[in-house]
Image: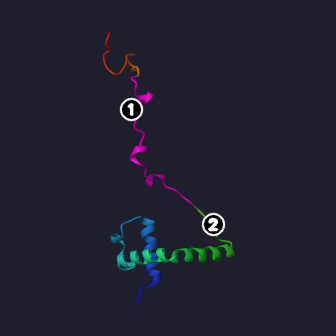
Amino acid sequence: RWRDHRQVINAILWKLRTGAPWRDLPDRYGPWKTAHERLRLWTKDGTWEKILDRVIVKDDAVGELEWITSVDSSVVRAHQHAAGARKKGDAATEPKPSPATGKDSAGPAAD
């Protein structure tokens, strides 16, 4: 017999909202493996899409549908090569005069 769907949906939503590991799921939601497996199965068979479609149709008919999209840049990760490191032959790697002395910062010049 399946665990109560409402409890499992609340567990899945808690996990997605907090970003916590599955094993940190509070006991009130039941076993974490149950919620994880249900999410996996429902994603695979299209149940989540059906739920969203029903919610959209119902809320749109009532006139309460409002889409809010938010991207938190503190969790967006860039690839290590996108970190802005200089490449060989880059014009920015040439020595620049020091603002204090006016001499090249690369070291003593060979005269």
* Foreground pick, 43 / 76: 43
Tell which residue pokes out farthest to the front in this image: 89
The stretch in magenta equals 69-95
Q: Residue 49's image quarter?
A: bottom right
Element type where label 1 sits in the image: loop
* First-in-chain label (1 vs 2): 2
Tell which residue pokes out farthest to the top in this image: 111
Vertical comparison of 111 with 43: above or below: above
* Foreground pick, 77 / 98: 77
Residue 110: x and y, percent?
31, 13
Q: Tag 2: Cα neighbours inside 10 Å, few (<14), some, or many (≥20)? A: few
Q: Which mark is residue 88?
A: 1
- In the visual, does 3 lie left or right of 60? left
The three-letter amino acid code for the residue at tag 2 is Glu
The three-letter amino acid code for the residue at tag 1 is Lys
The residue labelled by disc 2 is 66
Residue 11: x and y, percent?
42, 75
Q: Does 33 lie within the magenta span?
A: no
Residue 59: x and y, percent?
64, 74
Q: Residue 77 carries which label?
A: none
- In the visual, does 98 lie left or right of 67? left
Q: Does 81 lie within the magenta span?
A: yes
* Foreground pick, 91 / 102: 91
